[in-house]
Image (spheres, grey):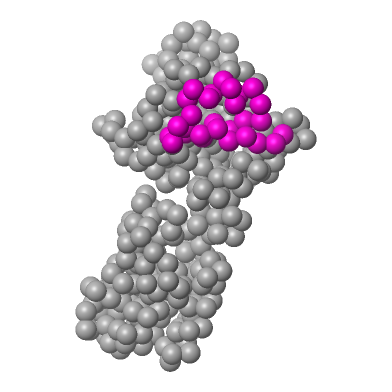
Amino acid sequence: MNDAHYMSLALNLAEQGRFSVSPNPMVGCVIVKNNKIIGQGYHQRAGEPHAEILALRDAGDAAKGATAYVTLEPCCHQGRTPPCRNALLSAGIKKIYVASIDPNPLVAGKGIHLLRAAGIDVEAGLLEKKAKQLNEIFFHYIIHKRPFVIAKWAMSLDGKTCVNTLDSKQISGIKANAHTHQLRREVDAILVGANTLCEDDPELTARSADGNVIKHLTKIILAGKNRIPHHLNVFKNTSFGKTIIATSNEKHKEWFAPLLSEKIELLMLPKNKNGYPSLTVLLDELGKKEITSILVEGGMTTHQHFFAENLVNKIHVYLSPILIGTLQKKRPLIFSDASLLGKDIHFSTYWENA
């Protein structure tokens, strides 16, 4: 087994913390001695032991003289937990491979410097690209002090993102819907515009396949000029997480006053040059609340405003094999072939049950 293999195992371990470590990064650690893995661990939840600590516990006394593979630079400061640097030194680790430097100013190379100063051989940059991609949300949040923004929408083959037909408003299928809930589990907050909220009355929760709420998310509503009814689900089901109503309309102070509580907050924003609530300021305010990522679910007008302010970091699109157009009922199709042609995607379809 080579060094890249062990670091790859550490990255796979780190991945297991994806849904539970925010605002912390995902971190994995593998300890190897005489070409055998003697300890491993991953950070499981903010405030709980870091990956290095769990791996050292797993290795026990055998850690002395061993090599550690860590996906993120070991911390050297006192946070919610003691610094991992001290534990690695005390255990007698001989060499450490680090995938990526921690961008946190409290660490940012200091951990590696202190380990080297204590006589440990440290090599940084092994599978660095994969490590940074794994923690893209954490890196963005630490560097920019604002949430990582993911725009997500579903659309038909003819480019429709909403359904004005007599049948179901749902565009995407069962598996795509399940994937959406997985995306929701990965973020700290979900954002929708007022039109989407009023038309769909969503609960904006992350649910398991059996329908149970599995993560309490912050729900962010971009309120425009019109009043939003008080009876909607996001205002009724406050046990599922906090709701933030973001607006630049002064009249909303009075309108939403009866709803405000510890679970429902009104956030007043300045207007941007187009007269729309400043999304840049919104993200700055959310960053102060330790919200590291948001999933913008629409509608398209809301997406367009995020694109206009150049605030979207990642896009997820679900393309469904249906045609909507001006039809009263959606016409389902079946994908028969798909391929990548340069930068374009080509696919062919047939009518379902034709």
Q: Is residue 272 left or right of residue 57?
A: right
In the rendered view, tell whether residue 294 sits above or below residue 256. Answer: below
Residue 17 lies in the magenta-colored region: no
Residue 15 in percent (x, y) is at: 37, 57
The residue located at (49%, 80%) in the rendering is 112
How many marks do you count on the picture? 0
Q: Quadrant of the N terminus?
A: bottom left
Residue 211 in percent (x, y) is at: 29, 30
Q: Is residue 4 visible?
A: no
Using the rendered view, name the quadrant where residue 55 is placed: bottom left
Q: Is residue 294 visible?
A: yes
In the rendered image, the residue lying farthest to the bottom is 119
Depth check: give the residue in front, 288 or 202.
288
Depth check: give the residue in front, 10 or 198.
198
The residue located at (58%, 11%) in the rendering is 326
Residue 249 lies in the magenta-colored region: yes
Q: Is residue 5 left or right of residue 229?
A: left
The span picked out in magenta is: 243-271
The residue located at (40%, 36%) in the rendering is 241
